[in-house]
Image (cartoon, grey):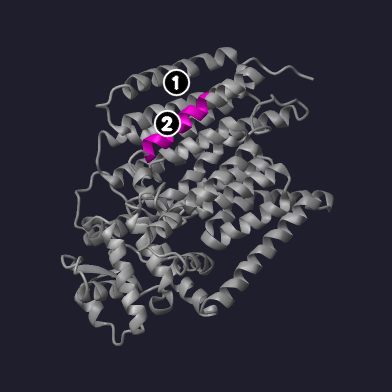
Amino acid sequence: MATPRPDRNRFAPLLLGLSALAGVGWWLLTHEDISSTAHAIWLSCAIALGLALERSAWGQRVTGRRVLIAVMALVCAATLYLRGQDKVPKLARGEFMQGWNVYHYYMGSKYFDELGYFGLYKYTFLADREDRNVLRKVRKTRDLHDYRWVPVQGEIDSIETNGFSPARWSAFKRDLGDVFDLTRRRTARRMVTDLGYNATPFGHLVFSTLSSRLSLGDVVERTVLLSLDWVILIPAFFVFGRAFGGVRAFAFVGCFMLFFGATPFHFGGMLRFFWLATVLVGISCYKLGHYKTAGFAFALAVAERVFPVFFLVGPALHVAWSWFRTKRLPHGRVNFAASFLAGLTLCFALTLTGGRGLRDWREFGENMFHHADFQYLVEKKFGVKRIFSHDFGADKQPHSADKARKRRIFREQETYYRLTLIALLGCVVIIYVASDEGNSMLVGMIPAFVLEDISKYYLVLWFLLFCMGPPLFRSRYKYAVFDVTVVGLIPAYYLLSQHTKSAMNLYTSANFYMVATVVGLTALLLGELRRRRRAPNRSETPAT
């Protein structure tokens, strides 16, 4: 058996550099006049340092790993304190909620029979006119059928008959008032110009079950409703730790708290992270060999948000290739597929019995058709297509004109977009070929990023990439460099935010960073594939 090459000397500059950044961050952390941005930069560098250390020979020892788990737990606690210090106490007292999120998912689900996918905003304006008139300064809103800007008065006039019963209409106005009571007026005026209620029929079934039983007007019930995310996330993080180890679990939680795409949403939302909990449980149980549980967890995730299906592409390709070569399917994978399909069937059946039947699915399909086409024009989104709709040097335009300008810019660069898409799809194929079945599941966010334009908070699953392990690379050093690169998205964003306040520039830069990471991973894996071809029996360096 060949002896692995020592990585000690190669680790030294990487660890020294990260230690220097952590030292500067510690100094910043001890000065109260430093902003939370500086704290986020330091904490993310500390996470990167911990991940790199765990890949080293010292980090593989029992003592080293225990020390790292303790330190990463402290860093994780610091991230929770940084993001929750001003929100959790208010949430416990019933004085805080994410008004934007709760408005769309509570009101949209509870009154879906009257509103459908397209009536939320027009009925909100009508109810507000009859009650508090909080939205009197809003002159334009979106027609949710096609997202055109239309006059508010025109939307109100388009209501021929009010489909609410008197009791339901009174309840709608009361719930709307409860939302406004805990929402800043500026936020309330902006949230009725968003893209409406977009839950899948199964997601709607979950949300409507909660909204019909828990009242926003009751402090206890509201606190319970807005705390459900952490009721399911904490067990999911625990299972994730069992599968991938304490260091990576604490690192993932820390990145979840620091990631700029999820920063405003950690507390006070209405079951906002159900998809995250189910994906983490699915991936963890798959790694631990609990295939039936993994399949059902992924069924819930796909039924609720659709995009988690990308995490199944890699394992499906590997299992299909294995069957092609051996004409045998591993029993555990058969159990996974059966559980996944049974779970999807159950979720679909529940939507038929608990909602408006196939009408919900038809309206959801119509809604998603123009919703997907609009995503790349929105500021805080991720996706390759999003890169080609932005001009860094363009002057700031009015909101409606800005969308038209972005469409024009994309049309001018569409050829370059398609060539880039082909190149990145080639990268995805190489990544799948070079990965084993388990690692191919962890890279599920890469094809999602390449092919879709997705909401910013979903990209927290990008940080699953630092959980990849053997036989991806021979060298622990390459794992460490890649881990640091993945986490580096966070401090890079916050550092750039000190130089530009344009959300378009910031998120376009983050998209470029992710493309560079995908290309860099592909280059590393091409090198590994060449080495495997030259020495197919050479042993792999043990690394976590």
Q: Is residue 78 above or below residue 284?
A: above
The 10 Å Cα crowd at callout 1, few under 14, some 14 to 19, many 20 or more, is many
Question: Residue at image x 49%, y 18%?
Answer: 15
**Which residue is most to the top?**
9
Give the SS element for disc 1: helix
- Res 247 → quadrant: top right
Query: Which numbered disc, 1 or 2, marks the residue closer to the eye?
Result: 2
The 10 Å Cα crowd at callout 2, few under 14, some 14 to 19, many 20 or more, is some
Q: Amino acid at mark 2?
A: Ala
Q: Is residue 302 left or right of residue 413?
A: right
| Residue 56: image location, x then y, percent | 60, 20
Question: Residue at image x 31%, y 84%?
Answer: 162
Q: Quadrant of the C terminus?
A: top right
| Residue 302: image location, x then y, percent | 57, 59
Question: Residue at image x 36%, y 22%?
Answer: 25
For label 1, the residue is 18
Comes first in the chain, label 1 or label 2:
1
Query: For residue 36: magenta?
Result: no
Q: Amino acid at mark 1?
A: Leu
Q: Are marks 1 and 2 in contact (CB under 8 Å)?
A: no
Q: What span is colored magenta in the figure?
A: 71-84
Alpha-carbon distance for marks 1 and 2? 18 Å
Give the SS element for disc 2: helix
| Residue 154: image location, x then y, percent | 22, 78
For label 2, the residue is 78
